[in-house]
Amino acid sequence: MRRPVLMLSVGFLVQIHGAPARAEEFPIYNMDTYCRDLSGGDFAGNMECGEKEAAAYSKLQNDWASFPEKRKIECRNVAYDADTGKGSYALHLQCIEKGRKQVRPAINPSAPVP
């Protein structure tokens, strides 16, 4: 008798549902499809993408409550493609971090913001 086997791509399991309707909910992205398409079928590229996605997923999940609602919505729109169901936690995190840098006040008002 054969037993069912659960395979986890890149050692990480994510439900495939698409982005949530409300920003306060943590997004669920299909990162497997995203990474597969991004890597063009290259195994090493797919693994590297998966590792980056897993790290970004963990950071976003840990810090989700601290992000402004408006930024969550803006970044979900950047990181998720409703037509394909593909999404990227790494893109979402980059968007969030970019927003933090833009709103951070400069110590010297005449100095450029990094």
Image (cartoon, grey):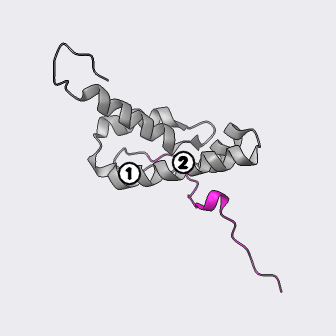
Badge 1 marks a residue whose secondary structure is loop
> Pointer 1: what residue?
25
Mark 2 packing: few (<14 Cα in 10 Å), some, or many (20+)? many
Residue in the foreground of this view, choosing between 59 and 17:
59
The amino acid type found where label 2 is placed reads: Glu
User: Is residue 18 within the magenta segment?
Assistant: yes
Mark 1 packing: few (<14 Cα in 10 Å), some, or many (20+)? few
Residue 61: where, in percent of width, then height?
39, 54
Residue in the foreground of this view, choosing between 12 and 24:
12
In front of the other: label 2 or label 1?
2
Image vertical order of residue 16 relative to residue 37, above or below: below
Give the position of the C terminus as an image quadrant: top left
Badge 2 marks a residue whose secondary structure is helix
Magenta segment: 1-20
Residue 39: where, in percent of width, then height?
70, 40
Q: Answer with the quarter of the image where residue 109 lies.
A: top left
Residue 76: where, in percent of width, then height?
44, 38
Residue 9: where, in percent of width, then height?
66, 58
The residue under the point 29% across, 51% down is 65
> Pointer 2: what residue?
53
